[in-house]
Amino acid sequence: MKRILTLALAALLALVLVACGGSGQSGAPSSSAVQGQSSGDGGPGYDKLTLKFSYATSDTGMDGVTAIKFEELVEERSGGLIQIERFPNCQLSGGDMQRHVEMMVAGGAFEMAIISETSFNVIDNEFYANALLFANPTYEDMYANFDGALGEYISTVYDKYNIHYFYTLPNGIQHLTNNKRPVHTVADMANLKMRAYGDTQMKMQRAMGADPVNMSFSELFSALQTGTVDGQANGYQTMWSASFQEVQKYVTECGIICSAYDILADARHWNKWSPETQQLIDECAREAALYARQYMNDQEAICKQAFLDAGCEIYVPTAEELQTFKDAVQPVNDEIMALLSPECLKALGLA
């Protein structure tokens, strides 16, 4: 009887072991589950991440609009595994745009950002490529450059600084505004106190006869309101997002530069993400950039109308008047060209 009972208990134990997993695997979760990747249902292996996403202007600026769209795409398509934590107005760098660039290069403060490309010319002269004045009179001209040879080349320059480049979006075709007088030719710029940011804008404003004041964007509205500066240069969408129509009277549509924003990631983080995560982030960055381009097309006329409704005077120079601006800044363009490598000039189609 004891023997029969012993055999029955042994058989029952064997059944229990089989039911618990006879393959010998423990009940501990797999490494992919620990890392927060989806598994087991055939779904993509996305990393579980919370990404800090930094940008310079408000949520209504082009970088903010793009960051919000990117957040929506990533969180929806990752099923919430990847969360985007947005930081507008250079919050992580205390509102300092130059510090924002330095933090992107140093790494560690945030994983992703949207930053004006020319802001990086303080670390590498090749980033002057998009600083040539009056070089891209339309958005289509800019897109042709950045979706082609120039974009490919700039990506290799970013690589040197552990920055992964995704795509470029417009920050508007920059025009001049001021509070003092209508500006029809470059002679009308004489002695205007104009906000500038970075070496190229400082030289440009001086070349046009203005008195440049180096200033971060976060300080600009107050400075225009109090008369610390008389004017500035930006695109309609950026100016409208900051309510400059409330503190500026005159707009001169001269199309100085087609300003570019780049969507970027810290490569030290990017290289650690799974291939599935990298593919998702890349796809969402591309869609967000394309969304921003269309948004710019749709919104620019609306933003311009807001300036007219606020009582601003908008002037479009004749070809002869516009040439006075181009002639004045030609020495600045010559300096920029001298800074660029033969490889960069080739990518621009200038060599």
Image (cartoon, rainbow, N blue to C red):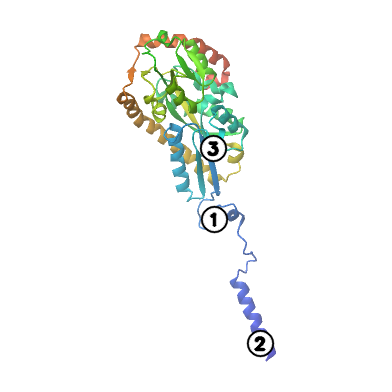
Which type of secondary structure does the marked residue at label 3 adopt? Answer: strand
Q: Nearer the viewer, residue 174 or 176?
A: 176
Q: Nearer the viewer, residue 340 or 233?
A: 233
Residue 263 x, y percent position in the rendering: 50, 34
Q: Which residue is tagged 2?
A: 5
Give the amino acid type for the residue marked by disc 2 in the picture: Leu
Which type of secondary structure does the marked residue at label 2 adopt? Answer: helix
Q: Which residue is tagged 3?
A: 112
Give residue 250's mark.
none
Mark 3 surroundings: few (<14), some (14-19) or many (≥20) residues within 10 A: many
Give the amino acid type for the residue marked by disc 1 in the picture: Ser
Choose the circle earlier in sequence order: 3 or 1.
Answer: 1
Q: Quadrant of the N terminus?
A: bottom right
Q: What distance separates the C-alpha of mark 2 from that of mark 3?
A: 67 Å
Q: Which residue is tagged 1?
A: 39
Give the amino acid type for the residue marked by disc 3 in the picture: Met
User: Would you say residue 307 is visible in this rendering?
Assistant: yes
Residue 143 x, y percent position in the rendering: 44, 27
The residue depicted at 46 percent of the width and 15 percent of the height is 193
Up-down: is 242 above or below 50? above
